[in-house]
Image (spheres, rainbow, N blue to C red):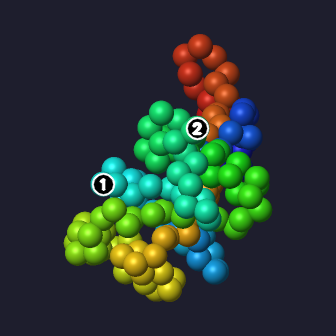
Amino acid sequence: MAYRVGARVIDLEYVQFHPNRVLAERGAGVPAHRGAARRGGVLVNARGERFLDGVHPQGSLAPPRCGGRAIQQEMAASGDACVFLDLSALKADFIRERFPNLYERCLRYGVDMTKEWVPVVPRRILRAGACMPISRDGPMSAI
C-alpha cells in the first residue's frame, strides 16, 4: 500500500511465515492452532519423526520463523508435499472441545484430527519490509 502511494520501501524480501497451515487440496487451508502444540500436539514428517526436536530446543513450540523454515527444509529434503500435526497424545473429546473451529474446518477438508495426522505446510502471512523515513523525525517519504 505504501509503495502504491509513492513511499520509498526497503527490505521487501523479508516475509513472515505461519509455520502450521492445514494443507487443503484447493487454496491455503486454515492455520493450525499453535495451541495444539502447547497442549501436546507435535509436528512430524511422513515417517513419524519429530524433526523439529533437532532444530530448536522447544521442538514443536519453536518460534514461527524457525518452525516455518524447518518445515520447508524437511519438505525439500524428503520431497513430501507436507508435514503433519500429530495430536494422538490428546483425547478426541478434548480436541473437539478445545479446538472446535479447527476441528470443523479440518473435517471440511476430509481430515478427522481426532483419528489422523493433520497435513500442514508453511504459508506466507505478511511482508516484513518497511517504509523508509526521510528524516530523523520519522515522516515517511510519501507524506
Q: Residue 143: image x %, image y %?
A: 62, 34
Q: Is residue 9 above or below residue 48?
A: above
Circle 1 crowding by C-alpha within 10 Å: few under 14, some 14–19, many from 20: some
Query: What residue lies at 55% left-to-right and 69% top-to-bottom?
Result: 119
As helix, strand or loop, the secondary structure at mark 2 comes to: loop
* Disc 1 secondary structure class: loop
Residue 105, image x, y percentages:
42, 78
User: What amino acid is labelled 2 in the image?
Assistant: Val
Q: Position of residue 3 (x, y in %)?
A: 71, 44
Q: Residues within 10 Å of mark 2 (few under 14, many from 20)?
A: some
Q: Residue at x 50, y 56 (%)?
A: 43
Of residues 2 and 127, the one drawn nearer to the viewer in this rendering: 127
Residue 46: x %, y % from top left: 62, 65
Q: Which residue is mark 1?
A: 39
Total marks shown come to 2
Q: Which residue has dot 2 on it?
A: 55
The answer for how far apart the CA atoms under marks 2 and 1 are is 20 Å
**Could you tell which of marks 2 and 1 lies nearer the N-terminus?**
1
The quadrant where residue 15 appears? top right
Q: Residue sitting at 62 percent across and 30 percent down?
A: 140
Against 70, is 43 above or below?
Answer: below
- Does 100 sit left or right of 139 as displayed? left
Amino acid carrying mark 1 in the image:
Arg
